[in-house]
Amino acid sequence: MKRVVVTGCGVVSPIGSGKNKFFNSLAQGKSGVDTITLFDATTFPVRIAGEVKDLDYGRVLETYPSAKSIIDRKVFLGLSAICEALEDSQVGEEILKRERVGINFGVSLEVLPIEEFFKSSESLNDGSHNIYSNLIKNKKSLQTPLDATNRIVIEKHKISGPDFVNCSACAASAQALGHSFQMVKRGDAHVFICGGFDSMLNPLGIGGFSLLGALSTKNELKGAACRPFDAKRDGAVLGEGAGIVVIEELEHALKREAEIYCEIVGFGSSLDAYKPTDPDPEGEGAAAAISMALQSAQLSPDRIDYINAHGTSTPKNDEIETKAIKNVFGSRAYKIPVSSTKSMIGHLIAASGVVEFISCLLGFEKNLIPPTINYDKKDPYCDLDYVPNQSREWQGEYILSNSFGFGGQNACLIMKRWSDGNEAY
Amino acid sequence: MKKRVAITGIGAITPLGIGIKENWEKIKNGEQAISQIEFPGGNFFPHTFCGTVNNFNPSDFISERKMIKLMNREAQLAVSATKLAIEDAGIDGYYSPYRTGLYLGTGLTSGGLENLIPLAKNSIDENCSFSYRRLGSEALPNCNPLISFKMLANMPLCYISILFKIKGPNFVFNPWSSKTAQALGEGMRAIQQGEIDCAVVGGCDSRNHYIGFLTFTKLGMLSKKGISCPFDKKRDGIILSEGACVLILEELEKAESRKAKIYAEFSGYATATDTDSETLFSKNLEVLEQALKRAISDAGLDADDVDFISASANSHPVGDFVEAQAIEALFSKKHPFVNSIKGMTGDMVAAAAPFELAVCAFSLKEGMLPPQVNLEKSDGNIRLQFCKNKPEKKDIKVALSNSFEMGNSKVALVLRRHS
């Protein structure tokens, strides 16, 4: 089995894009949540979200001109992070073109831009007939298949390795990363460009999630609405963004003298098999994914030094996740710092896993773990060390990153600090 | 040491029928399941010929009525096909839930426009134009609060896990047949690597509605004539179809020790990537050849060992031709029998790959080649040994199933007869 390291990353987030800006904001405990501006949400029950404010369309189109005709915002978020990750890894066009490089992106759903759909019908009052005929006449394709970004990237860089589109909701990008890790480990590719991107910040996304009762309606709190593990939490806050990492077989990375962020050592994937609407209240599936990740890393639970939680800020998730952590780690659970970066960036759905993974690998680099902000009042059922409100200096060796998806799909990743002595192993 | 993998259960719900036995009977009779249907807005298309699953009642398969209501049609089909597959394999409760994986391919799950029209109608302001404020104040409060369940591409997998207590490693891939073929391949790999003992793999899709026709019309993929005739001279595009097919994969030794019925051994998988993204159909035969070669060598075989090829040809003028060229180039010495089942079913898109693999498995087990329908006169440039227009007994040992038709991924899967 091969060893797998991370050699590049790119991130687009509500608290800033680019790894430095992103991590500085995390370290300072900044929130990226504010009133929605992408569309007029004044009459919606949920009017706050974490929007990306610094998306550079120009840069994306310069690198990927074929994205011009696409109207799905998440594609641009993704391409922007891909640009940064490829540059950061310095993997170079020759390797992308000539070697076995794979791509694996997590996305959530094909967005139906309802406003575009119905704007194209001039008079909507005379029934649906006009909608049907106008949509056919409209030359522009309003839909963007979920593999659109893959196709753009493949075409541009002539990437010929395995190509995957993972649709596992909130666990999608963590699954994409874990799957890519497994493929490099078993020698199916030398390099993988993997991660995810998402934007649910459209009327159907915000509307649909708020109908499910999963979102915080404390609109007046804005940046203080998302409060994972806090007793006053009342729901998730949606965000948008993208995270892409370049992972690589160790020997391959060493040979090209790549800079190494960390090693990926474990991945666990499980299902709750409980209810479509709720996570398993006992957190059995979540605990199983953590245990599987530890097993795949051949680590005992006492080696984990920090947990980047799924921590959505919904009443159920945070309590269940706490329970699952205690089930796996026993009394040591109280000694492991656990934080949720969602407190700052919101829930990026398909992109959440990888963006959180990136916050961990930057944590290794900066010797710092990000806080859970807006932590104010202790919940008796959530009694771990959640790194409240202030980032913390930290020099640990192993990090666990959790993603527990809507519908019960769970994915956990374990990464290890890289130091030059690690090569010997 | 790689473990070996067996196919021990098949659940198929297609326009041909419900259950693999009914499907196989219809295939042997060379039946075609394409018909004209009606749906709102259908009159704006040149025709509405497609493959439709008839006489399907989800409550025959799913007792949880509330859950049926949450599901879109794709999910109902997928869950029902899973039930058939698990019954067929007789594995209910046999393997540990955490040692059972679930790998699924789904299609476009945003569903029909019908879900959205009430939303849109309630979003019209006094000037007859679309208003976000009206959407928030009038449309949303009157909307089915669980609408998101019908739109998320991962939900079919979640329902399957819940209803059949599957808790192991899992992925959902999207949106084409080749992506589902990857799900089948990845499930097989996970067993080979010893990660799991059993995998439930498959795909589901349903595009027999306005949005489905709209998508494929805009992609320029639909047949104007309304006929699915792979490799035939008169082919002019695809016929949409719907369905679900789920297969049970088990570690071969474990399947043998519980004396399971084994359809075939699943021994090869390769996914190649076409770097040309301009169109959705295949243009580069080198990429297809690469997929075929790598899958065959992954199974530890040579091209000469292949007896039967289930082609992915979906009646597309270019795609079928390029696939034929790739087959011809690679199998120049011995000419395997070639068949595309899409002449009977149309293109079930994300459900096509598992059904075609199931047909290969059944053919190997029965020692019988399925007939090729709708092939009257093949393109003069296509020189393949096609299956006859009726079923034929043949001693076939190795079958290859191609999923090449849409998107960048070109996937080939290899099955061996189990003896």
Image (cartoon, rainbow, N blue to C red):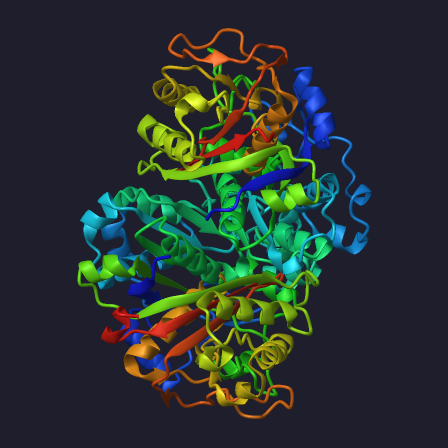
Residue A204: percent from left, percent from top: 56, 58
Considering depth in this image, is A175 or A186 the residue closer to the camera?
Answer: A186
Q: Is residue B237 left or right of residue B374?
A: left
Considering depth in this image, is A200 or B298 the residue closer to the camera?
Answer: B298
Residue A311: percent from left, percent from top: 53, 76
Which residue is painted at 36% across and 54% down in the image?
A184
Report the number of numbered marks: 0
Considering depth in this image, is A113 or A402 the residue closer to the camera?
Answer: A402
Which residue is painted at 62% across and 89% down in the image?
A379
Residue A419, above or below B334: below
Residue A89: percent from left, percent from top: 24, 62
Which residue is painted at 49% across and 16% down in the image?
B235
Residue B9, above or below A255: above
Q: Residue furthest bottom?
A: A377
Residue B121, above or below A408: above
Considering depth in this image, is A299 or A351 the residue closer to the camera?
Answer: A299
Instruction: Please state, as top left, top right, bottom left or bottom right, where the C terminus of chain B lies in the image.
Output: top right
- Any part of residue A18 in sight: yes
Residue A29: percent from left, percent from top: 39, 85
- Any part of residue B122 in sight: no
